[in-house]
Amino acid sequence: MLRTTYHIEKMDCAAEEQMVRMRLEGMDGVERLVFDLPARRLTVYHRREAAGITAALERLGLGAIQVGTTEAVDDPLEATSDDEKRPLAVALAINAAFFVGEITAGFLAGSMGLVADSLDMLADALVYALSLAAVGGPMLRKKRLARYSGYLQFGLAVFGLVEVARRFVMGEGVPDVTTMIVVAALALVGNVATLLVLTRARRGEAHVEASWIFTSNDIKVNGLVIVAGLLVWATSSRLPDLLAGALIFLIVARGARQILALANGKNHA
C-alpha cells in the first residue's frame, strides 16, 4: 500500500474537507483519507499510482500540492480498528443503560420529555452498534451505515411527535418534577462522559462523525428537559413537558437530516 501526502492551501474548515471527501471517497484504489485541517494536510492511503488522486484534487481548485509518496509501513485499516472499537463500545453501553433508565423513569413520572430523551438515547445506542459494525470496513460501507442511522433517527422523531400530539389531546396529568430533573441531570453526565470517550475514536469517518452529532445534540436535549421540569414546577402545568418533548423530537429530526447529508457527502454544518 502507498501513502501520499498533500498540502491543500485552501482546506481550512469542514466544508473544504467534505469537498475533498466527495471527490476521493469511492475512487478505485483509495483506502483511507486522514485529514489534518490546522496543518492543511491530507494523507491518502491507496493501492494505485497517485496521479489520478492528484488530478482529482487539482480539479477542486483548493491549491493541492503533492508533498510525497512512500510505502505505508502500517495498514491503516488494521492499526486503528481496536482504537475505534473500544470507545464506541463504551458509548454503546452508556447509551443503552440510560435508555432503559430514562424510559422507565419517564413512564413512572408521566414525563414526555424523559420518554423523548430515552428514545433519543435508544437511537444513539443503535448508531453506536452500527458504528462498531463499520469499523475496519470500506469507506462506502461506512457511509451507508451512517445513512441507515439517519433514517432510524427520523423514524423515531416521527413516532415521538405523534405521541406528543396524542398526550396533548388525551389531557394527561402533570409529570413528577423531581424525577424529571434528577434523571435528566444524570443523563447529561452520561452524555458528557460519552463525548469524552469519543475523543479517543478516529474523527473524520462518516460513522464516527454521526456519533458526534448524536451525542452533541443529546447534551442540548438534557438541558431542555431540566428547564422543562423547572417550568412545570413553576406553572403546575403539563404543557412545558409536552413542548419539551415536541422540541426534542424536532432536534432528533434535524440530527437525522445532518446524518443523511453527511452520508451523502455534503457539509452538515
Image (cartoon, helix red, strand yellow):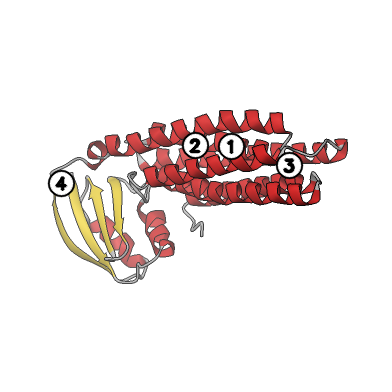
Q: In which quarter of the image is residue 150?
A: top right
Question: On the rendered image, what quadrant is the N terminus found in?
Answer: top left
Q: Nearer the viewer, mark 2 or mark 4?
A: 2
Give the amino acid type for the residue marked by disc 4 in the picture: Ala
The one nearer the camera, 87 or 51, is 87
Label 4, on which residue? 72
Expressed as whole percent of the image width and height from the top left, the position of residue 211 reads: 46, 44
Inter-mark Cα distance, 4 to 3: 50 Å
Lower position in the chain sequence, tag 2 or tag 3: 2
Q: Which of 267 and 252 is in front in this view?
A: 252
Q: Earlier in the sequence, mark 3 or mark 1?
A: 1
Q: Name the residue under label 2.
A: 127
Q: In 3D space, how far apart are the residues under numbered discs 1 and 2 (Cα atoms)?
A: 9 Å
Residue 228: image x %, image y %?
Answer: 69, 49
Task: Inspect the image, locate mark 2, and give the three-letter code of the amino acid beneath it.
Answer: Val
Query: Mark 1 = which residue?
Result: 152
Q: Earlier in the sequence, mark 1 or mark 4?
A: 4
Residue 111 placement, left or right of 72? right
Secondary structure found at label 3? helix
